[in-house]
Image: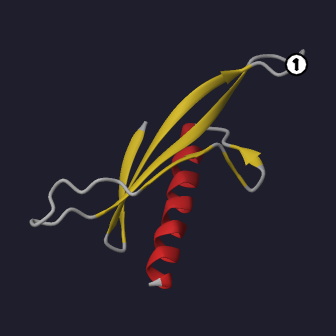
């Protein structure tokens, strides 16, 4: 699953990886990981803008993502926060 989001002049590309884990002595469980690529929106002068941040997010608020949709939204929220902090710090 993959989505592109636009936020404050940046592109947040969020994809989801599903990982099968077997805890010690437990049943097999699926975990979902959000993979973020953040870049500035492409412009006519720079159509091949490269990502400046690559992150793997496997949990937020201390909990693993329970579904692909949760991982997408969690990844978007983290990416949006990074963009906001980058812009506000300038």
User: Outermost residue toward the right?
Assistant: 25
Q: Residue at x 20, y 62 (%)?
A: 42
Q: Position of residue 68 (x, y in %)?
A: 55, 38
Q: Quadrant of residue 26?
A: top right
Image quadrant containing the C terminus: bottom left
Q: Position of residue 6 (x, y in %)?
A: 34, 63
Q: Residue at x 61, y 35 (%)?
A: 32
User: Outermost residue toward the left?
Assistant: 44
Image quadrant containing the N terminus: top left
Q: Residue at x 39, y 57 (%)?
A: 52
Tell me: residue 30, above or below residue 61. Answer: above
Q: Classify residue 21 as left or right of residue 2.
A: right
Q: Residue at x 66, y 32 (%)?
A: 31
> For the residue labelled by badge 1, is the local secondary structure a helix, a strand or a loop?
loop
Mark 1 nearby-residue class (10 Å; few <14, some 14–19, many ≥20): few
Q: How is the image coloured?
A: secondary structure
The residue pinned by badge 1 equals 24
Q: Position of residue 69 (x, y in %)?
A: 54, 44
């Amino acid at each position: 699953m993959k989505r592109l989001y636009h936020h404050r002049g940046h592109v947040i590309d969020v994809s989801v990886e599903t990982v099968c884990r077997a805890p010690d002595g437990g049943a097999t469980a699926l975990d979902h990981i959000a993979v973020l690529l953040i870049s500035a929106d492409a412009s006519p002068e720079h159509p091949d803008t490269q990502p400046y941040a690559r992150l793997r997010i496997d949990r937020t608020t201390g909990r693993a993502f329970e579904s692909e949709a949760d991982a997408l939204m969690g990844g978007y929220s983290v990416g949006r926060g990074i963009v906001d902090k980058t812009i506000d710090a300038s």
